[in-house]
Amino acid sequence: MKVLTLLAPRWWGFRNDLFFGGRRSLIKAGSLLAVAVGFWVGIYVIFYRVLRYFQAVEEFGDLLAYKLLTMVYLTFFGLLIFSNVLVALNTFFLSQDLEIIHATPVSIGEIFAARFLDTLVESSWMVLLFGIPIFTAYGLVYQASPVYYLGLVSVMIPYLILAAALGITLTMILVQVFPAQRTRDILFLLSVLVIILLFFLFRFTRPERLVDPDAFANVITYFRALSAPASPYLPSSWASEAIWPLLKPSSISSGFYQGFLWINGLASLVVCAFVALWIYPEGWSKSQESGRLLAGRFLGLVPKQLRPRKTRRSQTLTLMGKDLKFFFRDNTQWSQLLLILALIVLYLYNYSVLPLDSVKVPTFYLQNLIAFLNVGLAGFVLASIGVRFVFTAVSGEGFSFWIMQSAPVSMRRLLWSKFLLYLAPLLLLGLILTIATNELLQVSALMRWLAPITIFSMVFGITALGVGMGAVFPNFKAENITQVATGFGGLLYMILAMGFIALVVILEAGPVYILFMAQARHHSLSFFQWLYVGGSILLLVLMNIAAVWLPMRYGVRKLADYEG
Amino acid sequence: MIRLEGLTKRFKQVTAVDNVSLMVAPGEIYGFLGPNGAGKTTTIKMLAGIIRPTSGSIFIDGLNLLKHPIDVKARVGFIPDRPFLYEKLTGSEFMFFMANLYGFNGAGREKRIQQFLELFELAEWAKELVGSYSHGMKQRLIMSAALLHEPRVFIVDEPLVGLDPKGARLIKRIFTRLKRSGLTVFMSTHTLEVAEELCDRIGIIQKGELLAEGTVTELKELAGQEAPRLESIFLHLTGAETESTEDIGFINQKK
């Protein structure tokens, strides 16, 4: 019973958030649900269409569907292990309530059982959420009987237990070697590097060539690889072997692999419990000792003008310097720069391998069209980075926000210091994305100037929108800053930023087309065309000013009224 | 030096502070007492400019806080009840950061920072991240930073929470010294001995209303009893005296 008691706060917290949070909380939950349903439907449609397409492919359609299933299970397994390790670090070692729990007369076994279930649920719900539409698509495309769906439940339970047990055991061992806090940092950095590596591996194999009939010789080699069996030692292979026969009408029994999964799932649970009872108390005690961290790491990356210490400088520079130091001292923040760097490389690589010659449209026209659309795409990339870094900038003050509230610093100055800090790197990134792409596409002189100027002016709006909206929806109590980006305010920021970018692109499209065609045909513009172009430019300028001024002004007002 | 006029704060249906008016003279230490949830921290937060009053005015050093927030804040040193600080800064960096924020660029600022770090026994830890500090160390660091820019008014919410006896004695000495140099202190506390020992005048708040104020002697007279200690006066005025007679025998009762 104590296990249920230990699990109760999580459930109660969830219930209270929902029912006592008022209308705002319900709106938030509703919006998140809508997004989840959107994703759900999207995934279902994609998989349904892909599987239908595979079915239409004679001979090896089934083989492709089977391979896709093993890939799904393998990907899920990797994700599950990783997320279980991260979640277990929190639930078993870093969570704030552990101190109270360990002081109560609850046995280690009971704490383990409760935290195991906690970890299992927290790290598996996402996989289940994304898995359901995929498996439903399989079931419907193959017109599977109810046995398939029952089998699915029977496979998923030991599959998830197995991943959780492995992840938690790994965490217990890791914490014996490194302090809990450091383990999280190391894992985070490793995960970033692994994601980058996977990105590159996937992208550089150029999967788009598979749709090119000229590359068919390679596809045969590819299918030879496809028909090779997956590793028999991986639980993901056991899961796909257990599920696949249930999709076929004349199915051979999947009982062996189901049984194998259950036996291994339960065995892993026993091993995990044994390891936990053996080393968890010591690991928990160790995690309480690791306090002192050495400061100054990565400080070398901070520009000298913004470094701390003895310089006397304005409040704005002081605030910017503080934020910059925070960034470079937080491994979860600066390491994401590596991801952005990888993103830029892949972004530009994509443009460098565009098969423009094979499309039956004049290359010159197409190159410029793509370069123009690239402005919107680059804006989208900047907004995505903005939601993670700029939108969260105000919330990053955290519980220490009282210092800003009680210091002789106006909220205007605070917000503008954050605006200035993030403006420079976003401008640089925007210019790199547009100028380098223009070079790769060999665009016209008009586009060569237009794209960077547009992105340059747009970055001001994207940054101001991020800072301003972050001030309108601050969350100073978030344990993890990424929660802030994925919350309701972050979603609204993305919608508004996308709307702003789309409006800029739409407003520019008409005048750009007129100018471009006039240049291509060596015509001069009529008076009305000049009027149209001039009017559009004026409107664009006004819109950009509004995108900076309005969110910043509103943000300053809301933040000044913030009473936590 | 501090003047509150009809200060009121409402949170939806709840009136946390109800029409509080009081004055604190320059060089005076004013103790703000009250049971939990009486409205002490809300009043202090309004004084520090963290939350806005629903109605009423706050004057500090003759300036209206609502009209001149930046000028007023520059004259105030504030210490909250919970020491949340920038965990990724070192102690020394935090001091320089606060000095810049408060525009304290006077001569000898580095020396003054060093002196404060030594006074509060933080010099040894000055190059360590604040995240690795204990609760008491964080409290002492906030205290150093709040005094750094030579404020004219010191607003403190529970100054002794989390401090060991040595730290508590140091704070008492500092308050006495500050008072002598003309600094005004407005502090809330639960430690009635400290209030009795340090404060020139005391205000007692309950359910958002200022029940009584005056020197300890005046409060004794107001309570109409020969109460030897502030605790008895406090319990009498807040009506908590009767509660203490309630039956608590059940605590150790065998089932």
Image: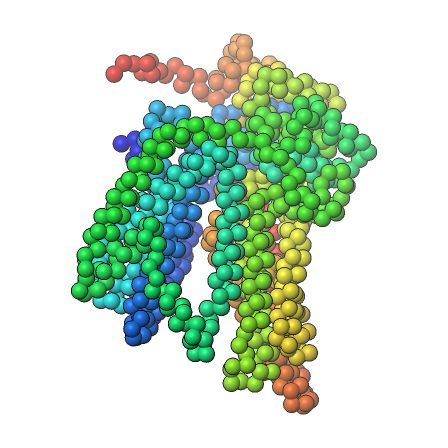
A509 versus A309 height, above or below: below
Q: Residue at x 64, y 54 (%)?
A: A422
Q: Position of residue A169 (x, y in %)?
A: 39, 38
Q: Give residue A367's quadrant in the image.
A: bottom right
Picture coordinates of residue A505 (x, y %)? 57, 73
- Of A386 and A405, nearer the camera is A386
Residue A415 vs residue A359: left or right? right
Residue drawn at x 46%, y 79% is A214
Residue B197 vertical position relative to residue A477 in the rendered view, above or below: above
Q: Nearer the viewer, residue A221 or A172?
A: A221
In this rendering, would A429 be left or right of B108? left
At x 67% / y 23%, what residue is drawn? B121
Looking at the image, is A270 positioned above or below residue A216? above
Q: Position of residue B157 (x, y in %)?
A: 58, 29
Number of marks in the rendered image: 0
Q: Position of residue A550 (x, y in %)?
A: 60, 60
